[in-house]
Amino acid sequence: MLGPTERLAAEVAEVVRDEVREVRAQLLRVARPTGVGLALLATAGGCLVLGAGAASATALRLLETFLPRRLATAGLTGGYLVAAVVLGRAGLTQLRAAGGGSAWLADEMQDAVSATASRAVPAGAAAVRDELDRWGSGRQEPPR
């Protein structure tokens, strides 16, 4: 036979177990739809990327109807880069305006982008120079 203290401890332990079971059941009820919702959002994001790619290909084909292929590609790429810079600067401005950790994040992102650009821009310029040199030397015809 259990004493009063042991009986109280057993009853408290049973109440705690019941509460833990109930909390676990509630979490599972919430987590399942959340997981499905997140999966649907991720799939929607993938479809958005595919749609943007298709729109970009369509825009490129349209530009190629009246511009040489390389010029159309360069123009579309330049447009995307300009849009990225404008939108990126606007986003960084918003983060800085929010202050605190957001401002720190904006500074870190700008430093990372600046470091990458300082390596990528000279490499891209060198590739363009090499291509122009090949055209100038007559080794390759400019594209139409």
Image (tube, grey):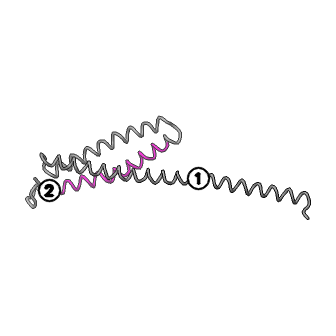
Q: Which residue is mark 2?
A: 133
71 sits left or right of 84 in the view: left
Pointers 2 and 1 in contact (C-beta within 8 Å): no
User: Whole-percent x and y of residue 118?
Assistant: 34, 50
- Mark 1 Cα within 10 Å, few/some/many (few <14, many 20+)? few
User: Is 93 part of what is drawn in magenta?
Assistant: no
Q: Earlier in the sequence, mark 2 or mark 1?
A: 1
User: Whole-percent x and y of residue 65?
Assistant: 13, 47
The secondary structure that most of the magenta stretch takes on is: helix
Q: Nearer the viewer, residue 91 or 1?
A: 1
Q: Which residue is mark 1?
A: 29
Q: Name the residue: 14% across, 56% down.
A: 133
Residue type at numbered disc 2: Asp
Q: Is residue 87 above or below residue 39?
A: above
Q: Secondary structure at mark 2?
A: helix
- Mark 2 Cα within 10 Å, few/some/many (few <14, many 20+)? few
Front: mark 2 or 1: 1
The CA distance from mark 2 to mark 1 is: 65 Å
User: Whole-percent x and y of residue 84?
Assistant: 33, 44
Q: Which residues fall within the magenta stretch? A: 104-131
Q: Name the residue: 9% across, 61% down.
A: 139
Q: Secondary structure at mark 1?
A: helix
Q: Name the residue: 52% across, 51% down.
A: 34
Q: Quadrant of the N terminus?
A: bottom right
Residue type at numbered disc 1: Arg
User: Whole-percent x and y of residue 92?
Assistant: 42, 40
